[in-house]
Image (cartoon, rainbow, N blue to C red):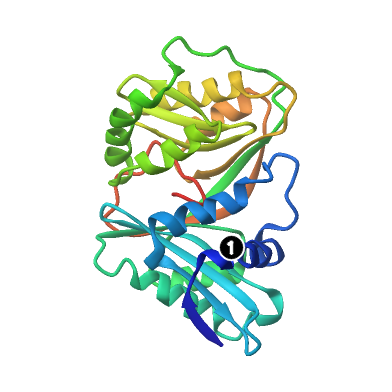
């Protein structure tokens, strides 16, 4: 096994590894360009956190991406093809990604439901916070709250300040990326923001639960009518989000976990993103 830094010419192979090991074929609510673009973005912003594993013939068998935002380290991606699992590939990749955040005060991982992955993260010293998902086509679409408007580039500075309060780290680079590629910013002036990308809620951060609930209602009110919506990571303790989702007729199901170590922000109200935390 060879573990080396990811290169630009690895992108297609990394995408193939992730589809085989982690993502599966793109579902209807995933835009075809998004999966490649999330990896490409982080290879640009965090090249020292991007790693791949290859077999003896040079074929990629795994990939990992660690990111740093301020003093927060996060695992954006860890994928190992099935035939290479159980051979230490995932552990070796995680060690390289973790080393990128050695001097960070806190770490976060949004985990899939994989028992092997969750065991790996728990063994690495991260505390587990169970998550649930809200999904489906809303049967009762709420009105958009008057407290929430569409965001624009001029809002990114104060949104970044909200993110720093919620998770102890900035979010401007990813907010700008989503805005560039068609994401809809939901802005509660100076107090909270959310991002919707077509049928998916990408992230939500706010100063209190009332603001957070209004932001989630705004996403539900403005999402494409009849689409299967996804709010994929609702950590334990975020009952305000569960109430809003159930009031809209969304289905509730268990999904993965949020792993945390060190001293991040208060992380509430905060609905993280799997790729960018």
Determine the residue positioned at 56% across, 31% down.
Answer: 182
Which is more toward the observer, 1 or 101?
A: 1
Expressed as whole percent of the image width and height from the top left, the position of residue 191 reads 32, 25
Q: Residues within 10 Å of mark 1 (few under 14, many from 20)?
A: some
9 over 213 or under it: above or below:
below
Which is more toward the observer, 177 or 191?
A: 177
109 over 139 or under it: above or below:
below
Asked which quadrant contains residue 176, the reply is top left
Can you see residue 34?
Answer: yes
Q: Count the marks: how many?
A: 1
Q: Which residue is labeled 1 in the image?
A: 11
Locate the N terminus by quadrant: bottom right
Determine the residue positioned at 52% across, 64% down.
Answer: 8
Determine the residue positioned at 53% across, 85% down.
Answer: 2
Determine the residue positioned at 30% across, 23% down.
Answer: 190
Expressed as whole percent of the image width and height from the top left, the position of residue 96 reads 41, 75
Which is more toward the observer, 112 or 62?
A: 62
Which is more toward the observer, 13 or 24?
A: 13
Q: Is residue 30 left or right of residue 171?
A: right
78 over 61 or under it: above or below:
above
Can you see residue 126?
Answer: no
Expressed as whole percent of the image width and height from the top left, the position of residue 261 reads 34, 61
The extreme top residue here reads 146
The extreme bottom residue here reads 56
Q: Is residue 242 left or right of residue 151?
A: right
Helix, strand or loop status at disc 1? helix
Asked which quadrant contains residue 199, the reply is top right
Expressed as whole percent of the image width and height from the top left, the position of residue 52 reads 53, 74
């Amino acid at each position: 096994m060879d573990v080396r830094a990811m290169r630009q010419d690895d992108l297609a192979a990394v995408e193939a590894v992730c589809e085989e090991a982690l993502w599966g074929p793109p579902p209807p609510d995933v835009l075809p360009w998004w999966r490649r673009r999330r990896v490409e973005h982080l290879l640009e912003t965090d090249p020292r956190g991007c790693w791949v594993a290859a077999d003896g013939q040079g074929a990629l068998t795994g990939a990992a991406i660690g990111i740093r935002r301020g003093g927060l380290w996060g695992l954006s991606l860890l994928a190992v093809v099935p035939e290479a699992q159980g051979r230490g590939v995932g552990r070796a990749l995680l060690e390289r990604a973790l080393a990128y955040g050695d001097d960070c005060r806190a770490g976060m991982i949004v985990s899939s439901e994989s028992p092997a992955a969750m065991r790996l993260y728990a063994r690495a010293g991260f505390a587990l916070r169970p998550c649930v998902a809200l999904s489906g086509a809303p049967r009762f679409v709420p009105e958009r709250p008057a407290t929430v408007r569409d965001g624009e580039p001029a809002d990114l500075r104060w949104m970044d300040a909200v993110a720093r309060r919620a998770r102890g780290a900035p979010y401007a680079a990813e907010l700008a990326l989503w805005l560039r590629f068609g994401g809809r910013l939901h802005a509660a002036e100076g107090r909270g923001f959310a991002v919707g990308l077509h049928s998916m809620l990408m992230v939500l951060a706010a100063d209190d639960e009332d603001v957070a609930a209004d932001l989630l209602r705004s996403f539900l009110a403005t999402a494409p009518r009849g689409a299967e919506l996804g709010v994929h990571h609702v950590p334990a303790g975020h009952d305000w989000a569960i109430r809003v989702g159930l009031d809209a007729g969304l289905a509730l199901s268990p999904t993965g976990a949020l792993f945390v170590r060190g001293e991040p922000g208060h992380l509430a109200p905060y609905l993280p993103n799997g790729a960018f935390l």
